[in-house]
Amino acid sequence: MYDINRLRLLDKAIIGVILVATVAFGALVEIRSVYLSTRKTDVGCYFRAAWAYRTDTNIYDVPDDNGWHYAYPPAFAILMAPFADAPKGFEQLPIAFPYKVSVAIWYFISVICLAWGIHILAKAVEDTSAEGSFLSSYPPGSRPWWWLRLVPFGICLPAIGSTFSRGQVNTIVLLSIAGFAAETIRNRRGCAGLWLSVGICLKVIPAFLLILPLVRRDLRTLGYSALGMFIGLAVIPTVGMGPERAWESSRYFLVHTIAPGLGEAGTGTMAKELTGMNVTDNQSFQAIIHNLKYWSNLPRPRQADESTKLLHVSLAGLMTLVSFLAVRRWADRRFSDMFLIGNLTMIMFMASPVCHHHYFALAVPLVLTLVAVEMQNRSDLKFGISMSILVLIQMAMEILPKIPALEKLRDAGVTLESGVILWGWGVATCWQLKSATVTIGQQPIVEERLRTAA
């Protein structure tokens, strides 16, 4: 008799291949980051800022070996202190890891954060499922258990691989958002606020997700988020740098990184390296609208015009409104919250002034929610035709722009469009589930456990 829970030989082989591939990819990242003539990674920015912090230098003034400057809040540079990497011509600081060791440790941290983030999302869905439902019926380590964790990983693999390759912080941000989502559906609002504050203190743009507790007038989540942000944005810099230096560093970050990203015209370092329309492979609404508007005008203007900015904000606002309407009056708070946070996360990074390809690793919460719904509705580990088509479209639209002969697809926003399609699918699924009585056997989706959660 077929046992859906039992791991087959092929399943074990796939898990083994993923583990081996993760280690092998780590070796490739190490080679690209350490042993080539130029460092093919962004971690140098973090490590060089840590060196600047430890030598009482402006953390935003000292570039890495590629000439790129640090573009994160001061607290992150302080926490990177053990990885301090001295510029050429300077002695390496004591009590600091060698650069090649730092790269390996950072890769390990990134992998752990990714695995932890996916796991706590999946476990939250399982733990809040109705007694007797498919998502609550399988044991840890079974085929469905692995399916709910590895399938979202596989669907988002192109962006995750780009994150690992570049040494980016997206997996830490993902862990923060995953914690926020998991604690929200468990109704642990204080913990949810603290989790979200981690991502805000690191990347700033997760502050967009505060719209959820704001709309719900959830003062507990807002209060704990404010507490976490106070610690990360004020206490840690003040203790680590001293009040005067912390103030100057924070002011510099606001003026030279945040302000240009919010539309203030700038000619400084970040405008030239990050926030200008022509300086990066930007997949934000604003950047793609700008590209299409000036498609044949090369070189394109360095700054977006006012109509582009207005359309950018209007799109983000409309998508946000639709996301809230899609879950309105939906009795199943577990899936409604998961879908809402997943959809808002998609809008968050696509509406960011700068949205690189690797940001799409943050699609994991929405993808995992869609996979969980498919598992629950079908009580099986097979995708329906529509879900299969969505997965193929998503992976194709993420991979094709990376092919050198198809680079024009980047300017046309194919990666962004894949994100919009995924968001639209999430919204459509919300409307479909909300308007139907969805059951697993005789068990409705609405969970009494969730209503009585702390």
Image (cartoon, rainbow, N blue to C red):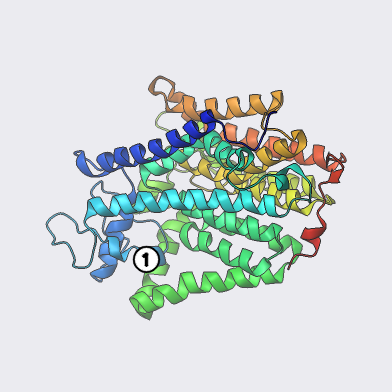
Placement of the C terminus among the 4 image quadrants: bottom right
How many marks are shown on the rendered structure? 1
In-front residue for pair 314/104: 104
Placement of the N terminus among the 4 image quadrants: top right
Q: In this view, does 217 lie above or below 295?
A: below
The residue labelled by disc 1 is 79
Q: In this view, does 62 lie above or below 19?
A: below
Q: Is residue 85 left or right of residue 383?
A: left
Question: Three-letter amino acid code at disc 1?
Answer: Leu
Task: Tell me which residue sits at (61%, 46%) in the image.
Answer: 365
| Category of crowding for the residue at label 1, using alpha-carbon neighbours closer than 10 angstroms: few (below 14), some (14–19), many (at least 20) | some
Q: In the current view of this chain or complex, which residue is farthest to the top?
A: 405
Task: Tell me which residue sits at (59%, 36%) in the image.
Answer: 419
In the rendered image, residue 221, in percent from the top left (x then y), is placed at 66, 67
Q: Is residue 199 left or right of residue 58?
A: right
In the rendered image, residue 367, in percent from the top left (x then y), is placed at 62, 40
Classify residue 77 by image quadrant: bottom left
In-front residue for pair 276/53: 53
Classify residue 430 by image quadrant: top right
The local secondary structure at tag 1 comes to helix
Q: Does any portion of residue 296 appear in the rendered image?
A: no
In the rendered image, residue 216, in percent from the top left (x then y), is placed at 75, 62
Q: Does any portion of residue 241 appear in the rendered image?
A: yes
Q: In the current view of this chain or complex, which residue is farthest to the front?
A: 1
In the rendered image, residue 68, in percent from the top left (x then y), is placed at 30, 49
Task: Tell me which residue sits at (23%, 69%) in the image.
Answer: 55
In-front residue for pair 222/21: 21
